[in-house]
Structures are given as structure tokens and as C-alpha cells.
Image (cartoon, helix red, strand yellow):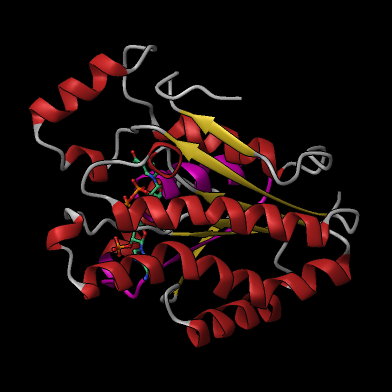
């Protein structure tokens, strides 16, 4: 039996992250969920919910370059490799631009965009040396269309596409693919925090007639992470129920 691929999912204990970890583990990957330091009880409850799948948890702050360096070093030391990197951790700091504080802008860019640089910068050499890597950056439909009150979020999410395409060009032909996934509105704590009237208006705009489920995104990440997906790189896969269509 071949050695399982080592997959790292940032924001792994969150709404989408949990489903992504589960899908990758079901596919036979050894999965490391990465989150900010949290209560031991929360981590244990999350691990229990994974029902025997090959998952573990590490803590790191993805907005911090050095924290990411230590994380990648620890994973490579423990597991021998870092093969699949899913940059999924994200936050919102919504405000119209006229009211947006510098701190709201900066915190969001640090967690949602600089994190991809931090982790890829430390993981890429190993992937290139081993001749295998799958990087999936979780963007958003907001990065494609813009969204009221989200100049910071949309800028970071659009930035992830430029980052993915550029790194894809640098690594294509060396066994490493870099792609982004753009979810529409998915049922997670992030969207459950929206007022019910706004959720209803959103649902009415989606041709599929429903918000997405975390598993819709997880299946897409698993697909892009597969060994067989070696000819897909620099792509963005929208998963939005038809909310935004483009070619
Ligand atoms: P979520 O449930 O809030 O999960 C986000 C995760 O990121 C949490 O586990 C959080 O940890 C972690 N995190 C935040 N800051 C971090 C940091 N500095 N270092 C390490 N981990 C950190 O959100 P979600 O809905 O699953 O979203 C996941 C990704 O999908 C995000 O990038 C989001 O922008 C994107 N997305 C979501 C939707 C949607 O409809 N839900 C749509 C489009 C795009 P704590 O819980 O400890 O804070």
C-alpha cells in the first residue's frame, strides 16, 4: 500500500474546514487541521466528531509568518512531507469603506491573503523537491463580483486568484498544481450570522434555489487535490449554485 498523502487544512475546525478535512480523510489522506490555539475540550470534541478518520490538530496563527514556518517544519518532521495544502482559514471584518478602520483592513488582509503567502512560502520547496504538491486556496464569489461592505474581503479573495495563477506558472511541470475555489453562499456559522431577511434575499438570487452545503466545497477540494488532477492548474472553480456565471 502506498504512503498516504499528508494534507494540511487551515481553519480546519471551522464550517467548511471540517467538511474538507472529512472528505480528504475519506480519500485516504492523513489530515492535519490547523487552527488558532483553542480550548482542549473543543479540539477533543472535534476529533471525536471525526469518528476514527486519520486526522490530527495543530495550532498556528496563519497571519503570522514565523508561526507558519514552525508549523510547516513540525508537520514535515512529524509526517515526512506536506503534500496537500488547503488555505481555507478566513475571517470577515465587514464595513463600508467610509467607516472602515485600518485595523479592519489589515487584519483581514493578514488572515485571508498574506496567510497563503506565509504557508506556501514555507511549503513550496519541499513540494518541488518531492515533485508533488496540491495547493487549493479558498476564495469567494465576493472576490469575483465585489460585495457591499466588503472592500477588504473582496480585495483579499480576488488577490488569492492572482496569487494562485502566478504560483501555478512557477510550479507547473514540477508536479505541483495551484488552484482556487470560489464558494458562493454556504451554510456555515459565517452565513448563519447573516440576518434572516438577508439570507432569504440571497437564496432568492441563487438559480439552484438553495444555499450550498460545506460538502459541496469539500468535494471540489478533494477533486483538485487528487493525484489524477495533475493537469488542472491556475484554475478557479466557482461553486455557487449558479449565483455568478462567467467563462
Ligand atoms: P468559519 O466557520 O468561521 O471558519 C474559519 C476558520 O478559520 C475557523 O476555524 C477559524 O478559527 C480559523 N481562523 C481564523 N483566523 C485564523 C488564524 N489567524 N489562524 C488560523 N486559523 C484561523 O468560516 P467558513 O465559513 O468555514 O469559511 C472558510 C473559508 O471559506 C474562509 O476563507 C471564507 O472566507 C471562505 N468562504 C466561506 C463562504 C461561506 O458561505 N461560508 C463563502 C465563500 C468563501 P477560530 O474558530 O478559532 O476563529
Does any portion of residue 137 appear in the rendered image? Answer: yes
Position above or below: 70 against 230: below
- Magenta stretch holds residue 237: no
| Residue 227, percent from left and from top | 80, 44
Left or right side of 45 for 10: right
Camera-nearest residue between 154 and 43: 154
Residue in the image at 28% along x and 67% along y: 105
Camera-nearest residue between 16 and 3: 16
Residue in the image at 79% along x and 56% along y: 169
Q: For the image shown, how many numbered marks are present on the structure?
A: 0
Q: Write down the region rendered in magenta.
A: 12-41
| Residue 197, percent from left and from top | 8, 26
Q: Quadrant of ligand 1?
A: bottom left
Left or right side of 58 for 172: right
| Residue 243, percent from left and from top | 39, 22
Residue in the image at 66% along x and 78% along y: 122
- Magenta stretch holds residue 21: yes
Q: Place residue 124 in its image quadrant.
A: bottom right
Q: Place residue 199 in its image quadrant.
A: top left
Left or right side of 166 for 227: right
Residue in the image at 25% along x and 45% along y: 190
Residue furthest to the front: 98
Position above or below: 100 against 65: above
| Residue 103, percent from left and from top | 23, 75
Camera-nearest residue between 114 and 83: 114
Quadrant for the C terminus, please: top right
Does any portion of residue 30 appear in the rendered image? Answer: no
Left or right side of 78 for 199: left
Position above or below: 222 against 244: below
Amino acid at each position: 500500500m502506498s504512503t498516504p498523502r499528508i494534507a494540511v487544512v487551515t481553519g480546519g475546525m471551522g464550517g467548511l474546514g471540517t467538511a474538507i478535512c472529512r472528505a480528504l480523510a475519506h480519500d485516504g489522506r492523513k489530515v492535519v487541521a490547523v487552527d488558532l490555539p483553542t480550548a482542549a475540550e473543543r479540539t477533543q470534541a472535534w476529533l471525536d466528531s471525526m469518528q476514527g478518520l486519520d486526522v490530527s490538530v495543530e495550532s498556528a496563527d496563519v497571519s503570522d509568518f514565523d508561526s507558519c514556518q514552525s508549523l510547516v517544519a513540525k508537520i514535515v518532521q512529524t509526517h515526512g512531507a506536506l503534500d496537500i495544502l488547503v488555505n481555507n482559514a478566513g475571517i470577515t471584518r465587514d464595513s463600508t469603506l467610509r467607516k472602515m478602520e485600518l485595523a479592519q483592513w489589515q487584519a483581514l488582509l493578514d488572515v485571508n491573503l498574506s496567510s497563503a503567502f506565509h504557508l506556501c512560502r514555507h511549503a513550496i520547496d519541499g513540494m518541488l523537491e518531492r515533485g508533488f504538491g496540491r495547493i487549493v486556496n479558498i476564495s469567494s464569489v465576493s472576490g469575483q463580483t465585489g460585495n457591499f461592505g466588503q472592500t477588504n474581503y473582496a480585495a483579499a479573495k480576488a488577490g488569492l486568484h492572482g496569487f494562485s495563477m502566478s504560483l501555478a506558472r512557477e510550479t507547473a511541470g514540477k508536479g505541483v498544481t495551484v488552484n482556487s475555489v470560489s464558494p458562493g453562499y454556504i451554510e456555515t456559522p459565517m452565513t448563519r450570522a447573516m440576518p434572516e431577511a438577508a439570507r432569504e434575499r440571497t437564496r432568492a438570487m441563487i438559480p439552484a434555489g438553495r444555499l450550498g452545503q460545506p460538502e459541496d466545497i469539500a468535494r471540489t477540494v478533494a477533486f483538485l487535490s487528487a493525484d489524477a488532477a495533475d493537469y488542472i492548474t491556475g484554475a478557479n472553480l466557482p461553486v455557487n449554485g449558479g449565483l455568478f456565471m462567467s467563462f
